[in-house]
Amino acid sequence: MKKYIYLLLCLLLSSGAFAQVPQGFSYQAIARDAQGNILDNQSINIRISILDSANTGTVVYIEEHKLGTNDYGLFNLKVGQGTIVSGTFVTINWSTGEKWLKLELDPTGGNNFIDMGAFELLSVPYALYAGTSGNGGTPGPAGPAGPTGATGLLGATGPAGATGADGGTGATGPTGAGVAGPTGPTGATGADGATGPTGAGVAGPTGATGATGATGVDGVTGPTGAGVAGPIGPTGATGATGATGAGVAGATGSTGATGATGNTGITGLTGATGATGATGNTGTTGLTGATGATGATGNTGTTGLPGATGATGVGIAGATGATGSTGATGSTGATGATGPSTTTGQNFTSTFGTSTITITPTAAGTLVPGLTQTITVPAGSVVYIATDGGIATTATGNGFSTVDVAILVDGLFLPNGGYKRIVAANTAGLAGIFTNWSMSASIILTPGTHTISVFAYGTAQGSNALVSSDNTSVLQGALTVGIIKQ
């Protein structure tokens, strides 16, 4: 939850022996939500607490600031000049111990505060202590300038504020003789904020930064102990055999059962192969076999190429004979049977989206308004279906939306095609991204009446999506159905 605000602290004070010390110091920050988006032009409520000695120390002062952010999420306030909840700012004893500033935020401007943490106030706010110190005696000589502290990391540049008017230089008061309190440790440098108005006070000296102690070297891990086991003690002496008893011998027991047959022994080695016997005499020649049946007739060979055409004769053309008389007109044939009544050629019809629907990630199938047609299909026809349209994500930041779009015939999905998953995803700096679907299919339906529709479904992913629209938006969907006679 502490991602709600990115802090940029700017402390502006002035002090002097005779000039009025302002009871407060400036604080400036940029408010963001948990996704890092700037909370621009929004009413918020900030609660400031001054803690004594530690970030969990005693609360000595609490105040609230109800204010608004600008176009960049930037807000300004003066600690010590808010609506007091408890304590008195002017009576805070800045000279005793560390002082910590705790920040709480309600991004809606109410009183449901979120703890944003606490940080130690360093040397600048302690100029307030000068406002309550004594006037002292005769000014002593000016001490040497302290060494310049190490430069902190440069934070992100905040939006530039308007340049304030130059304040007049205040009169230099005598230096008090009080003992300065110890310099607190240097805190982390906040990101640069917008330039505030120039204060008129004299800046106090910069305290020296303490050196960081060197990190100690880890000690070497000692070896694992390897103690030797002690020797086994000697076996004790065997005791003397006891005297034989004088009892009567018992009867002989019955013969025990025959033990199990032992395992078969290993097979002996195969003997050497005997010598080859002498070749036997050749047998008598067998009788000649009967003549086999005549084989099937072979395929006819390919036809030879045509011979060359002989030369044309050179005779004299005979005279043209007289035209014969026109023959009688034949009788009219019988009229053929009338063919079946069908659709001639092809017929195409288009319908268009009439309004937008919102598809949630858990939405069941929902008809896209306007994208439905009921047609009558004749026998021997092919039906062509095409649809297109757009979806837009409602996600913010880098969010996205996904929607499944499908063509249904009589409430059923097509066996192949007619189904697409569409994703509209925002990118860095661009939100409200939209994208389009486009698909088509050719199918054969049984003769008769059929209803063709386009449905949208949630996918259990991403944010809500806006699907299709009317003719005032680029998201408007369309459904075209054609009947083609084969």
Image (spheres, rainbow, N blue to C red):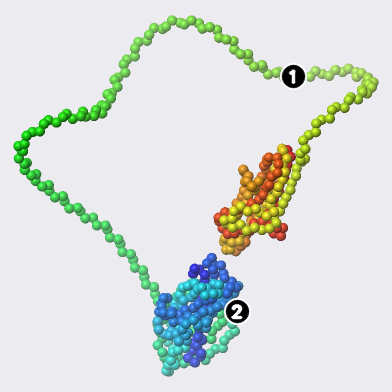
Residue 139 in sight here: no
Pinpoint residue 142: horizontal percent, then vertical percent: 44, 88
Pinpoint residue 471: horizontal percent, then vertical percent: 72, 58
Q: Is residue 322 above or below residue 440?
A: above
Crowding at dot 2, Cα within 10 Å, few <14 / some 14-19 / many 20+, comes out as few
- Residue 59 left/right relative to 262: right
Give 272 or 474, whichever is nearer the viewer: 474
Cα separation, mark 2 vs mark 1, equals 108 Å
The C terminus, quarter of image: top right
Residue 364 in sight here: yes
Q: Residue at x 57, y 10 (%)?
A: 293
Res 199 label: none
Q: Is residue 477 above or below residue 165?
A: above
Q: Amino acid at mark 1?
A: Pro
Q: Amino acid at mark 2?
A: Ala
Q: Residue at x 68, y 40 (%)?
A: 446
Element under label 1? loop
In front of the other: label 2 or label 1? 2
Pinpoint residue 101: horizontal percent, then vertical percent: 46, 78
Q: Earlier in the sequence, mark 2 or mark 1?
A: 2
Q: Residue at x 57, y 56 (%)?
A: 362
Q: Residue at x 61, y 52 (%)?
A: 365
Q: State the residue position of label 1.
A: 306
Tell me, yes or no, whether the two marked residues, 2 and 1, touch with CB atoms within 8 Å. Answer: no
Crowding at dot 1, Cα within 10 Å, few <14 / some 14-19 / many 20+, comes out as few
Pinpoint residue 300: horizontal percent, then vertical percent: 66, 16
Total marks drawn? 2
- Residue 258 left/right relative to 215: left
**Image quarter for residue 475?**
bottom right
Element under label 2? loop
Res 162 label: 2
